[in-house]
């Protein structure tokens, strides 16, 4: 089984698949996350084609993202997508935030986000929802 893993993870197969997907007009996105040293630092190596970047531009435009800009470099666009994606994956394992209410606030109809200065608006990338007609990407505002 080790030989199969080594065969699949070789860079030539990634380059070949990227070329084939690009020629077929399909988006291609592959991420390698690997440990760089014994301390636990990691590095991310991404392989993508221009079709993936076009999909990102369209999806973030439909979501009306305030921090994603079509004029950014491709690396910045991919970094934003990875940040959204990995943050949402880790978020389900993080402990829920608990708000401390004073005695006067108990029973009062106070919105919980009012203590932090207003309403919180977060951008969510939902990888499980593939309701779009052709795109496997889905970015929603929530």
Image: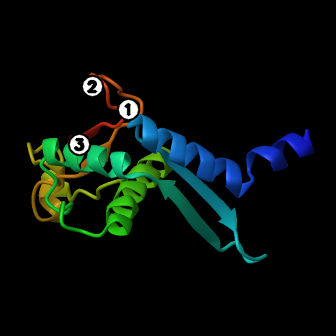
Q: Position of residue 60 (x, y in %)?
A: 21, 48
The image's colour scheme reads: rainbow
Count of numbered tags: 3
Vertical relation: 11 (above or below) 72? above
* Residue beneath the point at 35% across and 26% down: 130
Mark found first going from the N terminus, 3 or 1: 3
* Residue beneath the point at 20% across and 44% down: 58
| Furthest residue toward front | 23
Q: Which residue is mark 2?
A: 132
Q: Position of residue 34 (x, y in %)?
A: 68, 63
Vertical relation: 17 (above or below) 75? above
At label 3, counting other C-alpha atoms closer than 10 Å, the crowd grade (few under 14, some 14-19, many 20 or more) is some
Quarter of image, res 27: top left
In this rendered view, identify the residue nearer to me: 115 or 136.
136
Badge number at residue 89? none
Between the residue at mark 3 and the residue at mark 2, the CA separation in whole angstroms equals 10 Å
Badge number at residue 136? 1
- The reply to whether callout 3 and callout 2 are in contact (CB within 8 Å) is no
Assign a secondary structure to mark 1. Answer: loop
Q: Position of residue 31 (x, y in %)?
A: 56, 53
- The reply to whether callout 1 and callout 2 are in contact (CB within 8 Å) is yes
Instruction: Residue 95: tell me if it is visible.
Output: no
Between the residue at mark 1 and the residue at mark 2, the CA separation in whole angstroms equals 7 Å
* Residue beneath the point at 62% across and 57% down: 32
Between the residue at mark 3 and the residue at mark 1, the CA separation in whole angstroms equals 10 Å
Viewed as shown, does residue 102 lie left or right of 81? left
- Position of the N terminus, as image quadrant, is top right
Viewed as shown, does residue 75 lie left or right of 14? left
Vertical relation: 82 (above or below) 76? above
Badge number at residue 59? 3
- Position of the C terminus, as image quadrant, is top left
At label 2, counting other C-alpha atoms closer than 10 Å, the crowd grade (few under 14, some 14-19, many 20 or more) is few
């Amino acid at each position: 089984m080790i030989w199969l893993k080594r065969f699949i993870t070789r860079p030539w197969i990634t380059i070949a698949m990227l070329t084939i997907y690009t020629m077929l007009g399909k988006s291609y996105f592959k991420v390698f996350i690997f440990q760089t040293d014994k301390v636990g630092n990691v590095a991310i190596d991404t392989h993508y084609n221009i079709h993936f970047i076009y999909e990102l531009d369209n999806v973030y435009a439909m979501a009306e993202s305030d921090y994603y800009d079509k004029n950014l470099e491709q690396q910045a666009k991919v970094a934003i997508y990875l940040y959204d994606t990995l943050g949402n994956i880790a978020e389900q394992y993080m402990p829920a935030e608990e708000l401390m209410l004073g005695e006067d606030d108990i029973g009062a109809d106070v919105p919980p986000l009012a203590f932090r200065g207003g309403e919180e608006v977060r951008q969510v990338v939902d990888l499980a929802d593939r309701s779009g007609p052709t795109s496997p990407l889905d970015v929603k505002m929530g």
